[in-house]
Structure formats: structure tokens, C-alpha cells
Image (cartoon, rainbow, N blue to C red):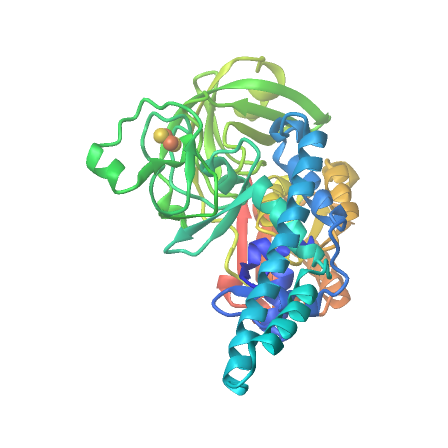
Amino acid sequence: MSESLSLTRAARLIGIPRAELQRKIKLGEMVAHDGRVTVSNLLACYPDAQLEDTAETHRIALIKERAFGKRVFERALPEPEVLAARITDLGKTLATSQAQVDRFNDLLSKLWDKLDDTPDISITELKKWLEQEVELATEPGFINPLAIKDNILRVMTAQVTILPSKHDFMVEGHDSMLEAAMRAGIPLNYGCSGGNCGLCKAKVVSGEIRKTRNHDFIIPEAEKHAGYVLLCSNTAVSDVVIEAAVADSVQDIPFQQIEAHVKATGLINDDVLLLHLQTPRTKRLRFLAGQGITLRLGRSFSAVLPIASCPCDDRNLLFHIQRQPGNLFSDYAFDKLKMYEMVEIEGPQGEFILHEKSPRSQYFFAFDCGFAPIKSLIEHAMSLEVENIHLHWIGSSKQHIYLPNIAHAWDDALDNFTYHEHIAGFDLRSMSGKRDETLSKLLQEILTADENMLQGDIYIAGPEDAVNVAEHFFTEYGLPKTRVSASRVK
Ligand code: FES
């Protein structure tokens, strides 16, 4: 296996986040050329990598599945055990053949050298030498376990590289290229996800694709010949390179108006309601993690709420609504909203989004219901395999830290994630001179406990008063405004 590997594929093979490889390259611990690494360099850094070493990959995949709210079996292949055994077997055969081809190539160059060095060699001597060398070349020899694993991975998944952004992602199971990109946290352009609007049209530069469903949108013949396809209706068979636009700012996301319905609603505790809206299959909400939308309940009560779920599941939108007696929107949501009721949504809006290209550690500060946009950002950061994620959830009271199990589950399952809870002991929506001081003191304690925090990116979300104090606290330390992002949740 002499070819070089993309970082995404190399990380998959070893079972580590892509960010870890990037860090090693940055520190000079691993050699890479043009974003690719060779297998020998990979093995030099990870000598213990084994074919069976799939536990980490599997664990991360499970976390992602949970985070995305998808069922693990949804993307499983038919008869997976049988199929996996056959593919493993084929992978071994292929790796053995590849190794032999490599040895015969070596033998061929040795033969040229021999003929150059000893031009007078007799046919008998040459024949004898060749017999010995061929015997050596046909010995079973050592088969690199990574070569076998790579062969298996190539059957189970295909890699898609996007130009000109150079993003790449893996396509697994039954996923279309669009679904796989969203799962990987890459915001490609799209609209309906169902073959109707044509917004996901992209040009295939190389590689083999296959249509997974018929679509109503008609691609003009000339464009078809030029390689244009709909990403929502095609999957990758081999490694594929496409030309497509990737949204990298909120300006790239169009304003949308959709009628969604209430899929579920229920109390998380006495003061917080979980609202689950589902959009029509052909009209999903395109948004960036951390953004919010306007919801109109009962046709007349509206509020702007942050979306508490990941853009990778654009049909199922989650919201955390705080009880605010006397507030018409909150009263309606808690007391009158029914299952299947239609809710108008408009948006998205807001610039509280992840700095995806930042190499720094990501620090998230959620005050009370500020956890909603923070949850969306963290789930997105996980799908991008951001290396270091730290969450501090500061509640007015214990009751205000209303979904601690999610944060604890992330903490238990991910090596690159830490979680801390803090109780302010007063209402974070209503700050004063004394409370400002107490909150700043708490932030100072958190900062003192982690000296690397000032080198990271800071994200703060919650009631306006508390966010103002925290934003002021970090900018006073000299952090540039571009590294302190804030979302004021009403
Ligand atoms: S997203 Fe509408 S056609 Fe693909």
C-alpha cells in the first residue's frame, strides 16, 4: 500500500479524530504533503495500529449517531455479518496480491540493476539468480494490517472531496452524497433534499457515482454531459471529486419560510419545555449550528428561539422553551400547544456560529437556557471532530441545568470533551452590581483552573445580563472580539 492517504481516510484507519493528525502535522511529528500522509509515516506515528482496532471508530460513530438522533441500524447494510466477513476475506486477498505485486516490481528493478552491473552474466547464472529471487518474492511475507483495513474501508465507504474548498467526507451505507456531507458537518448548498429544487446540483470531476432515486428536477442535457448531478439523489461508488459551493458564512444561507408541525412536546422540568418540530419532507430548514429562527404559535404569538439541534438533521428541529408566566408565547407553548399543530417558522438568523477553521480549543459557556444554541454548536463540533471541546454550564440554580445527562454522556464517551457544572445561586436574567461581581468571580475561578482557556475560542449563550458580564470579562482579559462569540437568548 504505497499510495498516500487523505487525512480523513488516515484518521478512519487508525480510529482517531482527524484533528489529532492535523495537530501532529502542525507540531512536526508527522510528515504530510498537500494534506496527505503516506502509510509508512502513519505507521511510524501509530505503530500499534491493528486491523481489529475498530473500537474507537465504532464508539465515535455511536456518539455521532446519538447526537444526530438517527438510529444506528438505519444505515446498516443487509446481512451485515455475512457481508462484513466476505469483505474482510476479500480485503485480505487483495492486500496479499498488492504486496506480491509490490515485491515483483522490486524484483523487476533489481533485475535491471543486475543487467546494468553485470552485462556479461550468462543465461544459466541469470536463471539461477532469478529462481532464488522469484521464490523470495512469492513467499507470503508480512501483510500490513492497515492495507487490509483500507481495502475493507474502500468497499464500505467512499471518499468525496469538494473543490475548491478541499473539504472531504466519507459516504457510508445508503447515504446520498448530500446526507453524508451533512452528517460530516459540511454545509453544501441544497434546498428540498428530495430531487425537486435543483439547488444541490454539483459537477462530478472524477470518480464513479450511482443514482439512488429518480428526481423530478430536470438537469439540462448539456449540463448532464458536463458531469452535473444532484447530490441528494446520488451516492459515491468510488472515491469522487466534485465541484460544489460550501456555505461558510450566514450570508450563504437563504431566508426560508416553512410550515412545520409539532412532532412532540413535553416538560424537561417544571420550567423548561422541549419542543420538537418536524418540517415537510420536501421543505427542510437549512441553517448553521448556533442560529435561531422565528416561531409563530397559534398564528399570532411569535418569538425568536435558538435551534437546539444539529443542522445534520434538518427536518427535526428541537427547542428549549423557558416558562415565563405572562409571556403570551411561553403561556401558549406550555398550556395550549398540541401535537401535530402547525407552526410557522422563518429564518434562520443570527451569527452565533462555530469558527470551523479555527485550530484553537473551543470553550462553551451556557447560562441556563443558553444551553440550546450551545448544544447545537457542540454537536456540530463533534461531527467536525474538533479536537478539544470544553463546556461550562452555569445555572441560576440546579434546576436551571436541565439536561445534565446529555453533557455527562458526552463527557463519559469522548476523550476530547470536558464538562463542568456551576451554580450561580441567583437569577441570571436579572443582574446587578453585586451579582455582576459574584459572576465575574466565578468566571475567574473557572479561568484560573484552566490556564489554556485564554488561547481558545469562547462561545457564550444565555440571558442578556449574564452574557454581557461574561463577554466583558473575557474581552477585559484582552481576548479579541473575533474570539468571543455571544448569543443573547430571550
Ligand atoms: S436538494 Fe433539492 S434537488 Fe437536491
Q: Is residue 16 visible?
A: no
Q: Nearer the viewer, residue 155 or 390?
A: 155
Res 428 → quadrant:
top right
- Identify the residue at horizontal 26%, vertical 36% (top origin): 224
Image quadrant in which the C terminus is located = top right
Q: Is residue 455 above or below residue 356?
A: below
Looking at this view, name the residue that lies furthest to the left: 222
Res 273 → quadrant:
top right
- Identify the residue at horizontal 62%, vertical 67% (top origin): 23
Q: Nearer the viewer, residue 136 or 421?
A: 136
Q: Nearer the viewer, residue 255 or 157?
A: 157
Q: Is residue 73 above or below residue 222?
A: above
Q: Is residue 476 visible?
A: yes
Q: How many marks?
A: 0
415 vs 30, left or right, is right
Q: Is residue 32 above or below residue 462?
A: below
- Identify the residue at horizontal 62%, vertical 29% (top origin): 77
Ligand 1 occupies quarter: top left
Image coordinates for residue 332, horizontal then vertical, percent: 56, 19
- Identify the residue at horizontal 79%, vertical 40% (top origin): 398
463 vs 353, left or right, is right
147 vs 36, left or right, is right
Image quadrant in which the N terminus is located = bottom right
Image coordinates for residue 204, horizontal then vertical, percent: 35, 44
276 vs 446, left or right, is left
Image coordinates for residue 45, horizontal then vertical, percent: 69, 68
Q: Nearer the viewer, residue 355 or 77?
A: 77
Image coordinates for residue 24, horizontal then vertical, percent: 64, 69
